[in-house]
Amino acid sequence: MNRQWIFRYNPEGPVTEDVFEWTQAPEPDMIDGQVLVRNRMLSLDPANRAWMRGPTYRPQVMPGDVMHGFTIGEVVKSHVAGFPPGTIVEAMGGWQDYALLAPEELTIRPADLPLDHLIGAYSITGLTSYIGIFDIGRPRAGDTVLVSAAAGAVGSLAGQLARIAGARVVGIAGGSEKCAWLKDELGFDAVVDYKAPDMRKAIRAACPDGVDIFFDNVGGEVLDGALRAMNEGGRIVCCGAVASYDAKGKSYVSPLLPGVLVTKRLRMQGFIVLDHMDRRVVAERRLRHWIETGLLRAATDVESGLERAPKALIKLLAGGNRGKMAVTI
């Protein structure tokens, strides 16, 4: 049987467990040109929430769909040359045990690497951090790089990559424990607790020479605080806007936009990592070197069991994770 989580409805406000329905269906029947994949690990990402709200860079999740999700899996049956049983693949396999997919929907991955790295640092998460820092932000030695959601999957890697590039790195995270973790274990130079009474003042204190690059995963009032601290000619890397994903009603929009972009001559650029897959081989080679030499730590927060996927997504959206959030299936 194929256990599945079905998406029921898009909630007004935060995601709750009743947004999903647990079902079981027969293992899918195959036809020529298809590959049956047994999902082994499921990625949980803030973007999962954005997909519920409407079309983005990919189709919206619709009621009745198996909940969309990025997976690492193993080919168990194949009617396609080049994908023998046992092949490890990544795909949009969804919140389920088995996915029936076409070969163009699959990317073969090394079988000798840990699954938590294949779902994180050596996949979309790591590539997003790499492209955002090196191709969009382009740090120079001595720059101050500010990273929001710095204890999350992308933010924790992005901050470390900026440090490797020779920048001074400041992270924004929620709570004293996360802030201590970023500084003591991941090597951030300074941290800002966005739960502090005056976050804008705290950003100024942590960045006395201003901010040259802001890597933004949050938007909202966090973006507003960073804009006030930006140096002339600074770069803003727009990776996500998690502050608005679970928002009920209108989310906060900074009154500084677009005026501050003009007066400070800022470059503000969004990006979707799927547009940069031609950079994957180089990025993955460098990421692997840095991880294996200890310069980069790929932290993971893994829950066990497909049945825990809704709880894990809720935990992620509430900021309860450190590093990459995933579920073993």
Image (cartoon, rainbow, N blue to C red):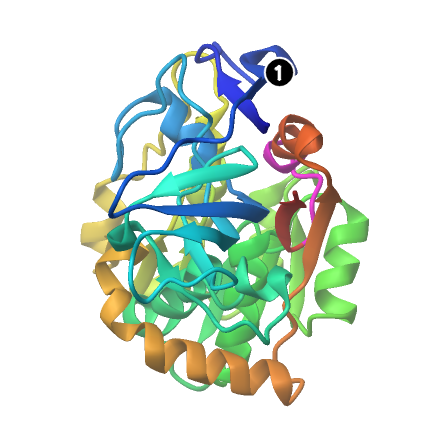
Classify mark 1: helix, strand or loop.
Answer: loop
Q: Which residues are magenta?
A: 315-322
As drawn, 298 above or below 56: below
- Image side of residue 170 versus residue 230, left or right: right
Residue placed most toward the observer, 253 or 131 = 131
- Image side of residue 35 versus residue 324, left or right: left
- Residue 327 screen position, x and y as percent: 65, 44
As drawn, 65 above or below 213: above
Residue 244 picture quarter: top left
Q: Determine the residue positioned at 59% across, 61% down.
A: 156
Q: Magenta region's main secondary structure?
A: loop
- Residue 164 screen position, x and y as percent: 53, 83
| Image quadrant in which the C terminus is located | top right
**Can residue 270 be seen here?**
no
Residue placed most toward the observer, 81 or 11 = 81
Q: Amino acid at mark 1?
A: Thr
Classify 10 Å Cα crowding around label 1: few (below 14), some (14-19), many (20 and above): few
Residue placed most toward the observer, 167 or 298 = 298
- Residue 47 screen position, x and y as percent: 43, 38
- Image side of residue 9 versus residue 309, left or right: left
As drawn, 161 above or below 46: below
Q: Determine the residue positioned at 30% across, 22% down.
A: 54
**Can residue 260 be seen here?**
yes
Q: Is residue 22 magenta?
A: no
| Image quadrant in which the N terminus is located | top right
What residue is pinned by disc 1? 16
Q: Determine the residue positioned at 48% across, 20% down.
A: 247
- Residue 169 screen position, x and y as percent: 56, 70
Tally of numbered discs: 1
Q: Is residue 318 magenta?
A: yes
Q: Determine the residue positioned at 23% across, 71% down.
A: 278
